[in-house]
Image (cartoon, rainbow, N blue to C red):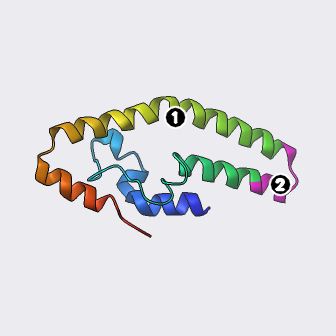
Amino acid sequence: MVFVLSSTYMLGITGTFLGDYFGILMDARVTGFPFNVLENPMYVGSTLSFIGTSLYHAKPAGLVVSAYVWLVYSIALRFEGPFTTMIYSKRAQTQTPAKKSSAASSSKKKL
């Protein structure tokens, strides 16, 4: 849960809930914790939560569902990762030098 909650905190509401897909970009791509530990902390954290719940309740079916969820996340990441890289690369190319320096300082947001 630490990865999921800290990711939500770092991304905010719009970054968490598909802001990138609707053109609502952050000043810069987030690189602080938990994104400096895992590339996709929300997906990893939620999958680990599913696995933990399955083990706690001793439900093998929950492990199967957790594996399925990870498979779906893996497929989604094949599209989401390159898309996120592309939109922030395009944004970096179109920004003025003053905006780039302010975006770099705001990306160092800490918990």
Q: Residue at x 53, y 62 (%)?
A: 5
Circles 2 and 1: CB atoms closer than 8 Å = no
Check disc 2: other Cα within 10 Å, few if <14, some if 14-19, many if 20+. Answer: few
* Residue 53 belongs to magenta span: yes
Assign the magenta stretch its main secondary structure: helix
Q: Secondary structure at mark 1?
A: helix
Residue extent of the magenta highlight:
52-60
| Rendered location of residue 87, percent (x, y) | 30, 36
Snapshot quadrant of residue 23:
top left
Considering only vertical position in the picture, is 111 above or below 1?
below
- Between marks 2 and 1, how big is the CA–CA gap? 26 Å
What residue did someone put label 1 on?
77
Snapshot quadrant of residue 63:
top right
| Rendered location of residue 109, percent (x, y) | 36, 65
Side of 38 where 18 appears, left or right: left
What amino acid does circle 2 point to?
Answer: Leu
| Rendered location of residue 56, percent (x, y) | 83, 59
Side of 76 where 70 appears, left or right: right
Q: Residue at x 47, y 59 (%)?
A: 8
| Rendered location of residue 60, percent (x, y) | 86, 44
Q: Secondary structure at mark 2?
A: helix
What amino acid does circle 1 point to?
Answer: Leu
